[in-house]
């Protein structure tokens, strides 16, 4: 397993380099100008000076090599210095800088990341807690009323986009019932019990919007995997040995059924970050999704490039995590 993990990590390096080149090339060659939003009264020579200060006068290979150095060398060193307090080298190095704010892009992402992680992380946990029991019971009681209702709700939840679900939640729970706030207060700090309750309330709607969409998909995969395993020979053998149905279903069958579902869960996490872009806009969550929208609207190419590449890194990383979890869930799987 260790050797397999090392091989996959080494294989991920050229994969990420190829992805970074494609992302950088597409966005760099796009018809965008960082001086496009400036007032028309600014002289052309001043605009050219601004473009030169951003390094846009350099040829494409030089700009790409500079971005690689900034992202893969300068930014990790800067993070290590910030976490440990050490000083590595001269301590003053060129970083990936936002065109709009002139601030380091990684600092902006770190500032926004906690809000997104809270919403995305809690939604994924809730989605798994909802989807696994529903999928197991629906498969065990196939064609029952529970299975029929679960199938219908799952199809509806999977078909309706998150922006529509979010608006329905706001109209029903925030406007009509006035249970939860419609806008997420990012500046809120938990200092006592009342502030903690308010934090829970403002997290419920954005979290549940993402959780329900994910749970609808996971429950279908869980049901299909359970149905496939319930008809296997080892299930009949376990029952013949006198094991109770609870042990057979919730231990033996569930463990084998989770193997394909783990892939969906692992690959869903980067997808949820993408879905959070819309959800954060609806509930005004000041996270990386909203940061990406601001970057796209303002033609902030370094910011968009960095966020897009981070999403690609998440996909590669969780693919590796899914492969490793295969070996943990199923001892029959061995990586030579």
Image (spheres, helix red, strand yellow):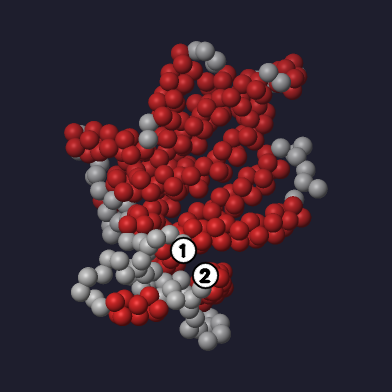
Which comes before the other along the chain, label 1 or label 2? 1
Left or right of 282, for residue 89: right
* Residue drawn 58% across the image and 24% down it: 224
Q: Is residue 41 something one can see in this rendering?
A: yes
Query: Toward the viewer: 295 or 93?
Result: 295
Left or right of 26, for residue 287: left
Q: Quadrant of residue 293?
A: bottom left
Picture coordinates of residue 85, whole percent (x, y): 50, 79
Q: How many badges with numbers are in the image?
A: 2
Q: Residues within 10 Å of mark 2 (few under 14, many from 20)?
A: some
Which residue is the site of mark 1?
A: 28
Label 1 and label 2: CA atoms lie apart by 8 Å
Is mark 1 in CB contact (under 8 Å) with mark 2? yes
* Residue drawn 31% across the image and 70% down it: 35
| Residue 80 vertical position relative to residue 185 in the rendered view, above or below | below
| Residue 20 vertical position relative to residue 63 in the rendered view, above or below | above
Query: Toward the viewer: 116 or 141?
Result: 116
Which residue is the site of mark 2?
A: 60
């Amino acid at each position: 397993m260790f050797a397999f993990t090392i091989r996959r990590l080494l294989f991920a390096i050229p994969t990420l380099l190829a992805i970074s080149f494609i992302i950088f090339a597409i966005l760099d060659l796009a018809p965008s100008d960082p001086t496009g939003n400036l007032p028309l009264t600014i002289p052309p020579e001043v605009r050219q000076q601004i473009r030169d200060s951003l390094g846009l006068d350099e040829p494409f290979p030089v700009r790409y090599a500079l971005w690689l150095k900034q992202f893969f060398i300068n930014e990790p060193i800067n993070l290590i210095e910030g976490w440990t307090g050490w000083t590595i080298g001269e301590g003053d190095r060129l970083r990936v800088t936002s065109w709009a704010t002139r601030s380091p892009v990684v600092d902006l992402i770190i500032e926004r990341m906690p809000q997104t992680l809270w919403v995305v992380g809690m939604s994924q946990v809730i989605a798994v807690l909802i989807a696994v029991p529903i999928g197991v019971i629906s498969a065990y009681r196939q064609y029952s009323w529970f299975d029929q209702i679960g199938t219908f709700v799952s199809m509806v939840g999977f078909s309706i986009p998150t922006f529509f679900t979010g608006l329905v939640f706001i109209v029903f729970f925030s406007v009509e019932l006035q249970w939860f706030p419609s806008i997420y207060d990012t500046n809120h700090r938990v200092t006592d019990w009342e502030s903690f309750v308010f934090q829970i309330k403002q997290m419920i709607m954005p979290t549940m919007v993402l959780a329900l969409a994910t749970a609808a998909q996971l429950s279908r995969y869980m049901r299909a995997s359970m149905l496939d395993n319930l008809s296997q020979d080892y299930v009949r053998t376990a029952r013949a040995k006198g094991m109770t149905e609870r042990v057979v279903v919730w231990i033996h069958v569930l463990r084998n059924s989770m193997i394909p579902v783990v892939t969906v869960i692992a690959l869903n996490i980067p997808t949820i970050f993408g879905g959070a872009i819309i959800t954060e806009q609806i509930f005004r969550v000041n996270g990386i999704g909203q940061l990406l929208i601001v970057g796209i609207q303002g033609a902030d190419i370094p910011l968009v490039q960095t966020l897009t590449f981070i999403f690609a890194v998440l996909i590669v990383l969780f693919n590796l995590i899914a492969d490793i979890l295969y070996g943990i869930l199923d001892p029959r799987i061995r990586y030579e």
